[in-house]
Image (tube, helix red, strand yellow):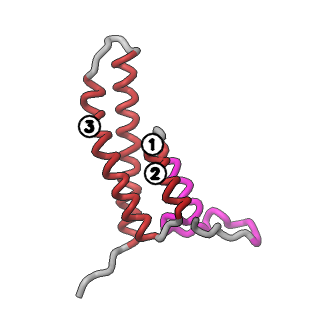
């Protein structure tokens, strides 16, 4: 008997990879500061965080595809997830938005509680 793909597990992995992507962005930005502006000028940060960020970026894209398929994201949500991977810390901003709107498999009722007649938006 095979077990069905667990949507909560996909969302949890996506969250973890999205935070790792944001942290690697921060490391790369700090490395770029020291390469171009800092004292002392050094390329060590870019040499370390460049490949790390590249690998985590690819993992983020794969996780976004798998999570989007599992959660049945619409085109707009896919585009925002991919845009979030390009903008520094955009992955975290996307996660906050996706959680609040129920696109991460979470219950958006917690966000709309206390607002009579308001329902969560449909997935795009």
The local secondary structure at tag 3 comes to: helix
Residue 84 belongs to magenta span: no
Residue under pointer 3: 51
Residue under the point 25% across and 28% down: 47
Q: Is residue 102 above or below residue 38?
A: below
Which quadrant: the C terminus? bottom right
Mark 3 or mark 2, which is nearer to you? 2
Residue under pointer 1: 86
- Magenta span covers which residues? 92-117
The residue most toward the bottom is 1
The local secondary structure at tag 1 comes to: helix
Q: Is residue 39 above or below residue 69?
A: above
- Residue 82 circle label: 2
Residue under the point 39% across and 37% down: 25
Which quadrant: the N terminus? bottom left
The residue most toward the right is 116
Residue under the point 51% across and 55% down: 79
Within 10 Å of disc 2 (Cα), the crowding (few <14, some 14-19, many 20+) is some
Of residue 115 and residue 13, the one placed in the foreground of this image is 13
**CA separation, marks 3 and 2?**
19 Å
Residue 5 screen position, x and y as percent: 33, 75
């Amino acid at each position: 008997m095979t077990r069905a793909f667990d949507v909560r597990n996909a969302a949890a992995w996506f969250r973890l990879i999205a935070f790792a992507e944001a942290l690697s962005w921060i490391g790369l930005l700090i490395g770029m500061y020291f390469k171009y502006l800092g004292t002392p000028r050094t390329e060590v940060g870019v040499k370390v965080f460049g490949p790390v960020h590249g690998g985590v970026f690819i993992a983020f894209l794969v996780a976004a595809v798998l999570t989007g398929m599992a959660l049945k994201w619409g085109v707009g949500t896919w585009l925002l997830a991919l845009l979030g991977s390009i903008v520094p810390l955009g992955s975290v901003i996307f996660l906050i938005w996706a959680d609040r709107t129920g696109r991460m498999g979470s219950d958006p009722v917690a966000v709309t509680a206390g607002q009579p007649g308001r329902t969560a938006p449909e997935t795009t």
